[in-house]
Structure formats: structure tokens, C-alpha cells
């Protein structure tokens, strides 16, 4: 490795910080482009100004997808991002799912989400995780853009002898039933990790079980700086480089404080989620973000997509509940961008395992039975003997007879396949074709268990 390239490697944390300032504040970005040397000196960032300007300008212009080999900052960014993506994909590898019914369900629901969302379909950095754990109820962050719109914080699952044993039992059952893909999960969802004073003790157990620390995203990086720095030391440089910790930034003032509190090197491997109103980033139009449309008329709001990354189980240890969820495009029926299939409760290891299996057995059947109630949750239209199912900038056309079309309408009215057969008087020789047709739509994700 050349001495010059080593210089760029050493400067990359400073480049990352400059990049964050530009994305967080379009006014700052314009100043930097107009007078890069003066701005770089003002913010005390040691970078090759010409290369930094070239790399950031290309990214914001939308041509960052092809690394410019002559720009070391762009190359390094791609190296670091791809390394983190590879680590995430390794943890989320579907071969690590032990239960095959769950794996098939996960694939169906993932395909459905991608069919409905062009943005999800083309976002190579987005990975769904099959499980997450909540160690509190509600969230004290109350971020006005939060797509999940959780209730206010109301309590923690404290780490004591009894709860520590239950937590360890829950992790073990998840590993046995779902598989080691659980290590791709997180110990927060509609919660703030730092709300729980015992958060670190819980993730130490997680690491003992799986050999990985769970992902952590916090809006409270500044509330107790010593705690935050302790978390970074606990996780260590190697796992931090695998996209394990993120700071959510909700204002320019908060970003300035983060930059003044942590050196570029300290948070080189920490992703800053620039959610402040001025940021060039946008919000998914779900949850509380609906209310921001009038306040931020020029802000980019993303429709036909969801921010929900959990496709599977949300285990709340405080309420001792298991929620089965799948991502959906936000709408009046799914305002937070997800469907909650069912919520069950547990008291101990045995009831947790039993509840997990019951959810899998009920919702994740690989073959549709005639007594199953179904929901048709994909838009479709009929033209002659064809049905066209429409997603986001994509469609699929399938041949369908009058019998198949009318049966589909009956499913939407709450009839099971068996009831539809009886009501329509479908002869035996057509019943097999109907079963095959329903199974095909189910496998595609166009219909689901109601």
C-alpha cells in the first residue's frame, strides 16, 4: 500500500465528517462547493479538499453508484460500506433460518414487500431482520418523524436474577426454533435502547449467545456521553465496522454537539442517521411523519415504501409479548407501514416456545388448506381471461377462468376455498385447478392467510 493511499485511509474519518455536514445542511454544502478550502479550514478537517469536493459532489448528484477509481475517498467509502453490508448479509443469511415454514413465509412476505415498493426492490443496502427484542415499553425519544409512532415510554424490563434467566431462555429458544439468523436482530424496535439502564447487560448476554452484538440505534448519544463511549468500547472496533451502532440526529444543533463531543476517529464506524429537518435525506410517509407534510413543504417524503425492517417477530420483554409483523406500504389501514398478524403472550420459557410455535403453525403454512380464510391484498384487474396483479412499477399477468376470477372475489368477501367451491358449485375436475391457482397466488404473496 502506497504512502499516499495510507494518507487517504487516515483522513477518511475526516472526510466522513465533512460528508455528514454536507448532507445534513444544504446551505453548508453550497458553501463548501463554492469555497472548499476556506470551509474545510473552518471546520478543522484535514482532507484533500479537491478530492473531497469531487467525491461529495458526485454522490449528491446521484452518480455515486459507480466508484470513480481515481478518487480515493469514493473508493474507501465503497470499501467500508460494502464490508458492512457483507457483514449484515452474513448475519441475515436465510440459510441460518432453521424452521423451514418460517423461511418460506419470510421469503413470501419479502417478495410481497418488494413487489409493492420499487424503492425496496432497488435498495441493495436494505435487509429485513426476522426478529427483534424490545426491552422497554414505549419510547422517550418522541421524534416527530418516527414512522412507528410508539406510545410514550412507560417502563423497563430490568435486569435481575429472574429476568436475566428469562432473557437467556428466550434467546436460546429463538436460536433453537428460528435459527442463528437471530444474531442479525436488534434489541430495540419501537423503543429507545438507552431508555433501559440495563441495556448493556442484555446485549452482553446476546453476544454470549450468538457471538455478535445486536444493532443499536439511539437518539440519545449525548444524554450520557460516558455511557455512549462505554458502549462503543464494549462493542469494539471490529464489530463497530460491521454497521452495529447508529446515532439518530434530529437537529443541526445536536449534530454540532456530536461532532464537538466525539472526535472523527471515535465515531469513524458509527453511522449518523441525519434525520434533521434540513437534511437532504427524506422521511417515509408513515406514523408521525404524516404530520410533517405541512411543516416541511419542500421535504422529500417517500411513498410506496416502508421503514419497517422487521419481518417476523417483535418480542417485548417488558410486556412479555410476541408480535408477528410484516412490512406493508403505509396507508390508512397500515399507518405505520406494517401489518400486525397477531400478538401472543408468554410467562416463562415453556410458554414462550409454545407461543412461537403456535404463531408459526397458524400463519406460516406452506400449503393452503380449503378451510383457510384468505385476504387478497394485492391490486388486480381482469381483462378477458387474464388477471393482472399490480405492484409498484411492476405487474404480473396470469391466465384465469371465470371460475377462478369469481372465487377470488369470494375470498375477498370472507369465504374459504371450501365455501367458495360449495357456493359456486365448482365441479371436482375444476377444484384441483382452483387449488393450484390459489397456491400459486399464495406463493407469490398476492394473497395471504387472513
Image (cartoon, helix red, strand yellow):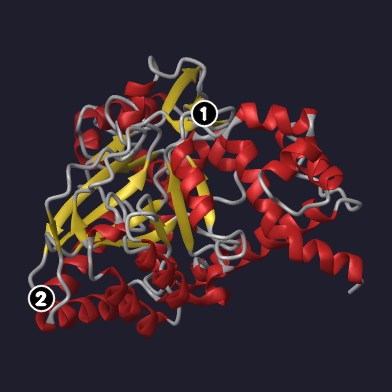
Q: Quadrant of residue 195?
A: bottom left
Q: Quick one: quadrant of the N terminus?
A: bottom right
Image coords of residue 27 (percent x, y) = 63, 26
Q: Residue at x 73, y 34 (%)?
A: 32
Image coords of residue 60 (percent x, y) = 71, 34
Q: Quick one: quadrant of the C terminus?
A: top left
Image coords of residue 231 (percent x, y) = 40, 70
**Does residue 9 appear left or right of residue 68 in this picture?**
left
Say what secondary structure mark 1 lies in. loop
The residue wearing badge 1 is 278
Observer-nearest of 106 and 37: 37
Between label 2 and label 1, give the one nearer the viewer.
1
| Above or below 79: residue 450 | above
Disc with the residue nearer the chain's start (2 vs 1)? 1
Q: Residue at x 33, y 74 (%)?
A: 203
Observer-nearest of 244 and 310: 244
| Above or below 387: residue 89 | below
Q: Residue at x 45, y 53 (%)?
A: 247
Question: Crowding at label 2, few (<14), some or many (≥20) Cα neighbours within 10 Å?
Answer: some
**Does residue 421 appear left or right of residue 265 in this picture?**
left
Is residue 112 visible in the rendered image? The answer is: no
Amino acid at each position: 500500500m502506497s504512502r499516499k493511499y495510507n494518507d487517504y485511509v487516515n483522513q477518511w474519518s475526516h472526510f466522513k465528517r465533512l460528508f455528514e455536514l454536507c448532507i445534513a445542511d444544504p446551505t453548508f454544502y453550497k458553501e463548501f462547493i463554492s469555497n472548499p478550502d476556506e470551509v474545510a479550514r473552518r471546520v478543522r478537517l484535514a482532507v484533500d479538499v479537491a478530492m473531497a469536493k469531487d467525491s461529495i459532489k458526485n454522490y449528491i448528484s446521484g452518480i455515486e453508484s459507480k466508484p470513480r477509481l481515481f478518487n480515493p475517498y469514493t473508493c474507501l467509502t465503497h470499501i467500508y460500506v460494502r464490508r458492512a453490508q457483507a457483514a449484515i448479509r452474513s448475519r441475515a443469511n436465510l440459510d441460518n433460518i432453521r424452521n423451514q415454514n418460517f423461511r418460506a413465509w419470510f421469503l413470501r412476505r419479502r417478495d410481497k414487500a418488494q413487489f409493492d415498493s420499487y424503492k425496496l426492490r432497488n435498495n441493495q443496502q436494505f435487509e429485513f431482520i426476522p426478529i427483534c427484542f424490545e426491552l422497554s415499553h414505549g419510547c422517550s425519544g418522541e421524534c416527530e418523524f418516527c414512522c412507528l409512532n410508539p406510545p410514550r415510554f412507560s417502563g423497563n424490563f430490568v435486569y435481575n436474577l429472574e429476568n436475566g434467566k428469562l432473557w437467556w431462555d428466550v434467546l436460546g429458544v429463538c436460536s433453537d426454533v428460528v435459527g442463528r439468523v437471530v444474531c442479525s436482530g436488534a434489541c430495540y424496535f419501537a423503543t429507545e435502547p438507552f431508555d433501559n439502564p440495563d441495556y448493556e447487560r442484555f446485549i452482553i448476554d446476546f453476544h454470549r449467545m450468538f457471538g455478535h452484538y445486536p444493532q443499536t440505534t439511539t437518539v440519545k448519544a449525548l444524554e450520557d456521553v460516558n455511557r455512549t463511549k462505554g458502549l462503543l468500547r464494549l462493542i469494539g472496533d471490529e464489530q463497530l465496522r460491521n454497521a452495529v451502532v447508529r446515532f439518530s440526529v434530529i437537529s443541526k444543533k445536536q449534530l454540532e454537539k456530536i461532532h464537538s463531543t466525539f472526535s472523527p476517529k471515535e465515531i469513524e464506524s458509527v453511522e449518523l442517521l441525519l434525520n434533521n429537518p434540513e437534511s437532504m435525506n427524506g422521511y417515509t410517509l408513515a406514523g408521525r411523519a404524516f404530520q410533517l407534510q405541512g411543516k416541511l413543504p419542500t421535504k422529500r417524503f417517500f411513498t410506496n415504501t416502508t421503514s419497517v425492517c422487521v419481518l417476523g417477530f417483535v418480542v417485548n420483554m417488558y410486556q412479555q409479548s410476541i408480535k408477528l409483523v410484516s412490512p406493508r406500504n403505509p396507508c390508512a389501514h397500515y399507518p405505520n407501514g406494517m401489518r400486525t398478524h397477531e400478538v401472543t403472550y408468554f410467562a416463562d420459557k415453556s410458554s414462550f416456545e409454545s407461543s412461537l410455535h403456535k404463531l408459526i403453525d397458524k400463519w406460516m403454512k406452506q400449503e393452503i388448506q380449503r378451510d383457510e380464510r384468505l385476504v387478497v391484498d394485492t391490486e388486480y384487474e381482469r381483462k378477458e381471461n387474464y388477471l393482472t396483479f399490480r405492484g409498484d412499477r411492476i405487474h404480473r399477468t396470469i391466465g384465469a377462468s371465470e371460475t377462478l376470477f369469481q372465487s377470488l372475489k369470494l375470498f375477498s368477501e370472507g369465504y374459504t376455498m371450501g365455501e367458495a367451491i360449495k357456493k359456486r358449485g365448482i365441479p371436482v375436475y375444476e377444484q384441483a385447478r382452483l387449488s393450484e391457482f390459489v397456491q400459486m397466488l399464495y406463493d407469490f404473496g398476492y394473497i395471504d392467510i387472513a
